[in-house]
Image (tube, grey):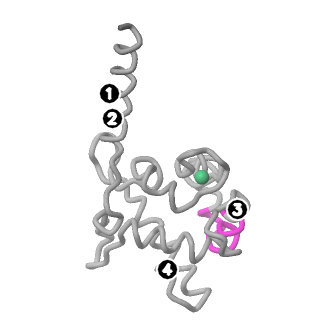
Amino acid sequence: MTKLILLYFTLSCLLALSCSTAAKDPTSIVDDCGDGKTFSRKNAIDCVFNVVDTDHNERITPKEIDDAKSAYLKWWEKTLSWIIGAAKTDNVMKKCDANKDGFITHTDFPKTQDTCMPLLNKEGKKTGALCKFKSFCDRAADKMKKTVY
Ligand SMILES: [Ca+2]
């Protein structure tokens, strides 16, 4: 009987967890970046794999994040991101690597939509994270002379 009760609670926890983190279609998560320009989570994910994943193995490593920052962030953005910690590589890994295996892959993104470039914060206000990432992607596209999302 005790085992059954325990099983019941374990199962209801698991179900509750999967319900609260149910993944949305990344094309439906869209930020309005002003001037009629929008940027979706799908755009952001495409950009990550086109710009940051330089060896094209569909796995983002901390070194690839560091390299992308050196290549496409301006010096003051690097300084600012270092001070506020938002774009620190450790934080990016903490927020975007769902299964903590040391790589960011396609399976991590659906599980990290509340922490990795979230559209809204816990209070339901817009974070602007997607639009900030859009400006990084646009600059990278300019330098790479190709479409990245
Ligand atoms: Ca991972």
Find numbered disc 2 in the image and state the secondary structure of the residue it sits on: helix
Judging depth in this view, the residue of 7 and 81 nearest the camera is 7
Q: Which residue is mark 2?
A: 15
Q: Which residue is mark 3?
A: 66
- Mark 4, other Cα within 10 Å: few <14 / some 14–19 / many ≥20: some
Residues under labels 2 and 4: Cα distance? 39 Å
- Does label 1 or label 4 sit earlier along the sequence? 1
Residue 63 x, y percent position in the rendering: 73, 61
Q: Are marks 3 and 1 in contact (CB under 8 Å)?
A: no
Q: Are marks 1 and 2 in contact (CB under 8 Å)?
A: yes
Residue 114 x, y percent position in the rendering: 39, 48
Kind of residue sitting beneath label 3:
Asp
Kind of residue sitting beneath label 2:
Leu
What residue lies at 32% left-to-right and 69% top-to-bottom?
Answer: 27
Judging depth in this view, the residue of 34 and 76 nearest the camera is 34
Magenta span: chief secondary structure? helix
Q: Is mark 1 within 8 Å of ligand 1?
A: no
In the rendered image, the residue lying farthest to the top is 2
Residues under labels 3 and 1: Cα distance? 40 Å
Q: Which residue is mark 1?
A: 12
- Does label 3 or label 2 sit earlier along the sequence? 2
- Does label 3 or label 4 sit earlier along the sequence? 3
Residues under labels 3 and 2: Cα distance? 37 Å
- From which residue to which does the magenta span run? 65-77
Direction from residue 115 to residue 82 in the image, left or right = right
Direction from residue 128 to residue 72 in the image, left or right = right
Label drawn at residue 138? 4
Q: Are marks 2 and 4 in contact (CB under 8 Å)?
A: no
Direction from residue 42 to residue 97 in the image, left or right = right
